Image (tube, rainbow, N blue to C red):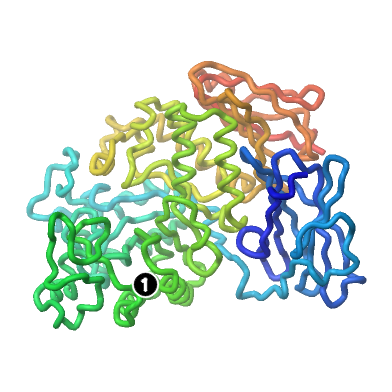
Amino acid sequence: MLLEAIEHRPKMNWAYTVDKETIHLRLRTKKQDVEQVHVVGGDKYAWDKTKTEIPMRIFASDALFDYWECEAKPPYRRFKYGFKLQGGGETVWMNEDGFHFTERENADDFYEIAYINPEDIIQTPEWAKHAVFYQIFPERFANGDPSRSPENVQPWGGKPEVDSFFGGDLEGVRQHLDYIADLGVTAIYFTPIFKAPSNHKYDTEDYLQLDPHFGDIDTLKCLIEECHGRGIRVLLDAVFNHSGKTFKPFVDVKENGADSAYADWFHVREFPIDVKDGIPTYETFSFEPNMPKFNTGHPEVKKYLLEAARYWIGEIGFDGWRLDVADEVDHRFWREFQTVVKEAKPDAYIVGELWHEATPWLQGDQFDSAMNYPFTYAVRDFVALGKTDARKFSYSLSTQLARYPLPVSQAAFNLLDSHDTERMLTVADGDKNKLKLAVAIQMTYPGTPCVYYGDEIGIDGGADPDCRKCMEWDESKQDLDLRDFYKNMIALRHEYPALRTGRFDILHAEEGEHTLAYRREDEEAALIVALNASDKAASVEIEITDGMNKADSWTVLHAGGADSEAAANRSLEAQKGRLTVELPAYGYLVLKANSSSAS
């Protein structure tokens, strides 16, 4: 046993509480090095009477490690624990004091969860785990009220430029809510709608005012009310890292320099503020002089921004926030932000724009989720670009799942593209079978999927601003087959809770191959997703083990790829505990165990 590879910490994603009586514990070991792991635990005040052993299972594996997990329900909400590891003919006990080759007589030096305090439970909004989001860039979705369009508005459907306007507004969204609901969408994510001079509105002028080109407050409230009436939640985007150049306090600093009452609202290195050799004399987003960075540690800045956070949730009715450039804002501000937002709406969903590992923000005291770009690029590399094989792709997924507590993974904001990236169809070089395969993964993987507006009808686009094209409303120019595919995949996700919060396990992922299989399972259903990310037909052999359901008959719920219709609505038979699945190029099957055969 390689002891140096074994890792556990009594916090973060290694040991956390999920409700008032349940603890999840995890342990990392060298890959294929340990055969069994048990948690040895009990109450610290009644060790002899409560001592128990709980078996752990491997829930994820990457290139180097296996990740073990178990659930414990301490009778008195206190838990002392250590680990018993077996492998290679030896047994090792691990506790807070290190490794031992004989069992400890007491639990004095064991890890400890001193008490399950309700305030420490990692809770993410239950509705978010079951939602399917639809991202809307308001300026490009629909022009429902031309009287509000900017003077320099371009004809709808033109080529997007950095500074172009096409007149999209909130009334346009309201007029197409039936379309959105028909897709099966249960939540909308709007990019910013605050008053701002740009088309994207990330250069905010006033955090408490709706941009008049989008509508007025009555229009907005009507839109939210109609969304809620259809069972659709609404997420609002904002950037609290920086303002825009027309933000009045910044204008005052430009005019009055160090004498401005707002001089400390920003990080100014030199007065008067200026741009020298392309570098502003004040902190900004990137080196963009039109986006001055806030001093979020300043009491007045904090008061202003937190009031905005409360206002749009508490008085206007939004259901949560997506937070731009979240990793450049201090953690103390985000903790106060969460308190304000959750007081206004306890089940508000808070998503940070974090492009990499987001552990520091996802401990239950700041965000519920992050923009899961590691998932985005893992899918792109495997499906669209062919850069990785099935094994490497499975390692990427496993690493992501091992990073975060289960409630966080179940609410992870899983996207394939956005207003900040190339469209997935463009990454896939226009191959819609690749796009469908990527969506099939997205809709059957743990987390909250988000569809970028227009993807469902075949809109393509390169990097910003090309990815921000106008929505196409002429059905003769829409890919209706692709739209039906999205509807069916979303409906499948809604139909089976196992696809949302069920167990996830990799069943098949071999080096050098591009076939992959994984299962999603809960008490109601056992599903297998088998897929082929190559341009040639292939077969995959899946071992039906681990008591998952030793079904010998499986029904195809959904199929995709070339000749996919021929694969649908049929049954497959397992032979001697093994299931062989034939897959077309860039195809997939979603299979359900027939209950009469399942154990």
Closer to the camera, 177 or 574?
A: 574
> Left of 30 or right of it: where is 584?
left
> Which corner quadrant holds the N terminus?
top right
Q: Residue 250, percent across and down? A: 18, 72
Q: Residue 64, percent across and down? A: 64, 40
Closer to the camera, 295 or 138?
A: 295
Residue shown at 57% from the left, 61% from the top: 126
> Left of 60 or right of it: where is 272?
left
Q: Residue 120, percent across and down? A: 61, 72
Residue shown at 70% from the left, 71% from the top: 20
Residue on which the image places disc 1 = 309
State which quadrant residue 82 falls in: bottom right
> Which corner quadrant holds the C terminus?
top right
Residue shown at 25% from the left, 76% from the top: 265
The type of residue carrying mark 1 is Ala
State which quadrant residue 510 falls in: top right
Residue that lies at the very extreme toward the top in this rendered image: 536
Q: Residues within 10 Å of mark 1 (few under 14, many from 20)?
A: many
Closer to the camera, 356 or 247?
A: 356
